[in-house]
Amino acid sequence: MTLPSRLGDTTLGDLLADLRRAHATGTLELIEAAQVHRVHLRAGAVQAVESSADARRFGDLAVAAGLASRTAVESAWGVGRDRGFRIGQSLVWRRVVSSAARDRVLDSQRLARLDSLYRVGDAALRFRSARALPEGAAEQSPLGATETFHGRPRRRDHGRSAADPARVEALAALGFERDPGAAPLRRRFQELVLALHPDRHPHDDSRARVDRLRAVIAAYRLLRG
């Protein structure tokens, strides 16, 4: 697939959506003058994010979340370095945090880095064949569509107010108070179309059902336009 050469010509959300639909495996690079950010994808899903735009380390996040003291983190770092452990591994090994808590911190770290990339205004783009994942990233589950896209800016939102009455009405027609993101929107649309389709109601030719089906289709087209 062919991607734009500049981030300013699109949005990160649209790029990641295209790569997800293509089930792409590789590394999307956002190249700024002083740094290169990398989003590693496996079968279209975000597996890891490398960026210095959000430089908070695992230990900082664990302390901020109240999972460990600064002293415990520094002690675990010293012991872990001698044993070849990463800081999260060392904290689990020393029973300071559980494996589940460590995974939650890793997920929050990855999401924070992805958030920082959504704030990049422009950068050169390059998609490369799969590079080695950052250490430990292969152990994490890839980000789901909701985590990757929900509430993120997309090209279709440019120049369009979130309070646009037509959008508000269209969202209400699909049963939402606010934009839930592309994947939930598509699922709800498919559910409603199946529920209202004439094939499901061979003996019901009521105008109300037909009008409701047309309203659902029109609402989805407006929201996805």
Image (cartoon, rainbow, N blue to C red):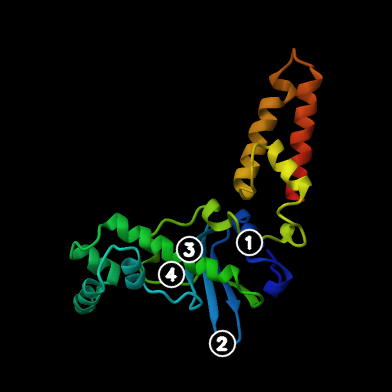
Q: Please rate how many residues cluster around mark 4, counting C-alpha atoms within 10 Å: few if below 14, some from 14 to 19, many from 20.
A: some
Separation of marks 1 and 4 at Cα, in angstroms: 21 Å
The percent position of residue 171, horizontal first and vertical second, equals 69, 42
Point out the tag, 4 or 3, that comes first from the N-terminus. Answer: 3
Amino acid type assigned to the residue bearing label 4 in the image:
Leu
Disc 4 or disc 3, which is closer to the eye? 3
- Residue labelled with disc 1: 13
The percent position of residue 131, horizontal first and vertical second, equals 48, 72
- In which quarter of the view is residue 169 placed? top right
Mark linked to residue 111: 3
Is residue 210 among what the camera can see? Answer: yes
Disc 1 or disc 4, which is closer to the eye? 1
- In which quarter of the view is residue 177 placed? top right
Tag 2 secondary structure: loop
Separation of marks 2 and 4 at Cα, in angstroms: 22 Å
152, 9: nearer the viewer: 152
Residue 213 against residue 201 in the figure, above or below:
below
Q: Are marks 1 and 4 in contact (CB under 8 Å)?
A: no
